[in-house]
Image (spheres, coloured by chain):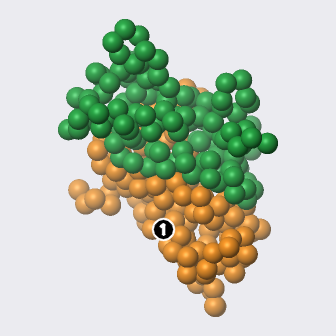
Chain colours: A orange, B green
Amino acid sequence: MPKQDVLIVSRGEAEPCASAVMREPLTVDQAADLAKVFKAIGEPVRLRLLSLIASHAGGEACVCDLTGAFELSGPTISHHLKVLREAGVIEGDRRGTWIYYRVKSDTLRLLSESLAPAQDVAVTA
Amino acid sequence: MPKQDVLIVSRGEAEPCASAVMREPLTVDQAADLAKVFKAIGEPVRLRLLSLIASHAGGEACVCDLTGAFELSGPTISHHLKVLREAGVIEGDRRGTWIYYRVKSDTLRLLSESLAPAQDVAVTA
């Protein structure tokens, strides 16, 4: 199986697959894939960027909307956005001069569910 | 306000406080505190340890239950357990020879809720 098939992140038409951290032991591959995403958001600037994008009017934001919140250069912000995009927690598309970023809700939902205590998931499943 | 008051992790009798990553921009302090916890679980061995403990019979496990799953030394496993404990995602208490570790469900629930898309939280709140 190609490595990308075990990613928790839904790709294209693939069915999202929640890693059940709290319900059964993760496999080595599941842990590696999931840890990459948690590592990507385990950085304060990236977590703030994610939060700013998610809560921005219309659910999307361009770099021009984000840089004002940080004392960081544009290229540094762009680097962090790239890490978030590569981890599959945001996606972006270019319109005119700017790339507009949105949170990938499916990925965030899978991350959220992977950490939910087993009894919570049982109630809401 | 002392720094520990803004930690997302419940300490002692303090009320747990979910950081709403998806609903409003995180403050600098909220992002720093939350990122520390995601960084702690953003490592494959630690994520597997967390998962093994959470899914172990009785909801707790000692190092003796965990080392067999890894080709790592006891001290390395203990180091990773210490990082998880310091991040507030597990807790342990000594009984006889061994320390028994349990997942801190309140912390995991807060992490889970912090990443839930806004509409999901609105439905379950």
Q: Position of residue B92 (x, y in %)?
A: 47, 22
Mark 1 is on which residue type? Val
Q: Is residue A99 left or right of residue B65?
A: right
Q: Quadrant of residue B81?
A: top left
Chain under disc 1: A
Judging depth in this view, the residue of A93 and B4 nearest the camera is B4
* Residue A19 to residue A45: above or below: above
Q: Position of residue A110 (x, y in %)?
A: 51, 48
Which residue corresponds to the image point at 20% horizontal and 38% vertical from the top-left? Answer: B71
Inspect this view and state whether residue A110 appears: no
Q: Is residue A41 left or right of residue B43?
A: right
- Residue reaching furthest to the bottom: A96
Which residue corresponds to the image point at 49% horizontal and 41% vertical from the top-left? Answer: A114
Residue for badge 1: A83
Quadrant of the frame with the C terminus of chain B: top right
Which residue corresponds to the image point at 58% horizontal and 74% vertical from the top-left? Answer: A77
Secondary structure under the numbered disc 1 in the rendered image: helix
Q: Position of residue B122 (x, y in %)?
A: 74, 44
Q: Position of residue B57 (x, y in %)?
A: 38, 18
- Residue reaching furthest to the front: B2
Inspect this view and state whether residue B47 appears: yes
